[in-house]
Amino acid sequence: MKKVEIYEPAGCASGVCDPMIEGDLIRLERMVTDLRDRGVSVSRYNVMDDGPAFMASFVVKEAIATKGIDCLPLTIVDGKIELMEKYPTDFALAKWAGLPWSDLEIYAEREKRDSTVLFGYVDEDKDKDCDDSDCSGDCNSCG
């Protein structure tokens, strides 16, 4: 199996998180636990808590030197940057971890299902949703 490392920004130290980022972190922790249970070496490093890990990685130091701290989060697999500036999907992590295709299908289906439904709307209905700028006062007039 592969070695997966995720180098993360400071995060929610203030106790206030963007709900989308917080959701990503919860999903990521669930996925990391799942991969570890399958025997995959997965490490997460936070810039505030794990400074030595950041300094020990030439790849991370170079990315931060050239792109700045905004390159975080970084996902590195076997020493190579696979993703920068956002958290990986479950499917991507499973694929980079070297899981068999039968397992990848499970993650692909889960992502497809999770991306299809957003707050009770299917993707094609999201564009029909009204906002205050196009509201005529008739709640049935939109979409």
Image (cartoon, rainbow, N blue to C red):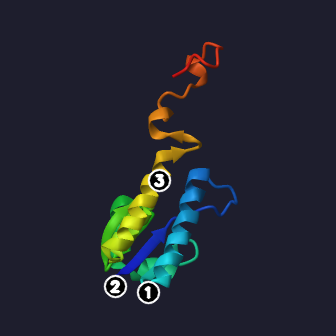
Mark 1 and mark 2 residues within 8 Å of each other at the beta carbon: yes
Q: Can residue 66 be seen in this view?
A: yes
> Residue 103 sits in which quadrant?
bottom left
Q: Earlier in the sequence, mark 1 or mark 2?
A: 2
Q: Which of marks 2 and 3 is nearer the N terminus?
A: 2
Q: Left or right of 10: which side holds 93?
A: left
The residue pinned by badge 1 equals: 39
| Residue 47 x %, y % | 52, 71
The residue pinned by badge 2 equals: 1
Residue at the image position 32 percent from the left and 76 percent from the top:
100
Instruction: Measure the alpha-carbon separation of dots 1 and 2.
Output: 8 Å
Q: What residue type is labelled 1?
A: Gly
Q: Left or right of 67: which side holds 141?
A: right
Q: Which amino acid does label 3 sit on?
A: Arg
| Residue 102 x %, y % | 35, 72
Instruction: Depth check: give the residue in front, 6 or 33.
Output: 33
> Residue 132 sits in which quadrant?
top right
Instruction: Measure the alpha-carbon separation of dots 2 and 3.
Output: 27 Å
Q: Earlier in the sequence, mark 1 or mark 3?
A: 1
